[in-house]
Image (spheres, grey):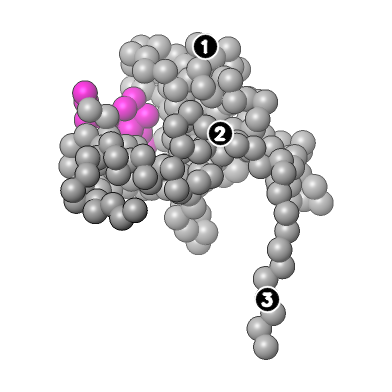
Amino acid sequence: MYFNTSKITPRENYQLLTGAVVPRPIAWVSTLSEQGVANLAPYSFFTVASCSPPVLCVVQVNPRERAAKDTLSNLQATRECVVNIVSHVLVDAMNTSCGDYPPEVDEFEKAGLKKSLSNSVTAPGVEDALVRFECNLREVKLVGEGAMAGSMMLLDVLGVEVNDAALRAGLIANDLLDAVGKLAGDGYCITRSNFELARPQNI
């Protein structure tokens, strides 16, 4: 079946994109509002944009009822955040934090999570996250306009906090990190089961 993306609804495009582009890593982004209220929210449109300089890319799919979610509003005000990686043991707390709460609600408290002090930013991290990226906002790029368009948040990585429990021989190990991936709809997957495939050698 062929889908002409200009002739179907944004929702149908969303379903095709999120159904096929899987699994997607989850950026669990913590910020502080100008009033000092902590915010924590997961985003599955997430990847590495550059290694030199180290830059992460997190995309907000714009909501229907307002221009920006609390994460983007806080980032634009303070220019700081922490991107926490979601291990399987934290998936229930992550799911709790994705509720549509008003700005004055602290999702750390809602999800029963402890905050960790950051080294380079004022925004707290999730204490039990095995990997935390401390970031400054580089820029926001708008892709489209209005609801269901994208607000691309490019984040300069200032430092990375890695728990020793995720390391093997000094490197982050897939099975120890036990990260969660996002699938279509309410689906998730774990990265505990994986395989290795050596790249072909140039001849």
Circle 3 residues within 10 Å: few <14, some 14–19, many ≥20:
few
Amino acid type at image mark 3 = Pro
Amino acid type at image mark 2 = Tyr
Q: Where is residue 83? Give x, y as percent.
A: 51, 36
Q: At 52% from the left edge and 59% from the top edge, which residue is drawn?
A: 51
Q: CB under 8 Å between callouts 3 and 2?
A: no
Q: In which quarter of the image is residue 130?
A: top right
Q: Main SS of the magenta segment?
A: helix
Q: What element carries label 1?
A: helix
Q: Is residue 121 visible?
A: no
Q: Distance between the residues labelled 3 and 2?
A: 31 Å
Q: Can residue 12 be seen in this view?
A: yes
Q: In which quarter of the image is residue 70?
A: top left
According to the image, label 3 marks what residue? 200
According to the image, label 1 marks what residue? 109
Q: Distance between the residues labelled 1 and 3?
A: 49 Å
Q: Where is residue 25? Give x, y as percent.
A: 53, 42
Amino acid type at image mark 1 = Glu
For the record, the magenta segment spans 65-79
In the rendered structure, the answer to whether residue 179 lies left or right of residue 82 reads right
According to the image, label 2 marks what residue? 188
Frontmost residue, 18 versus 115: 18
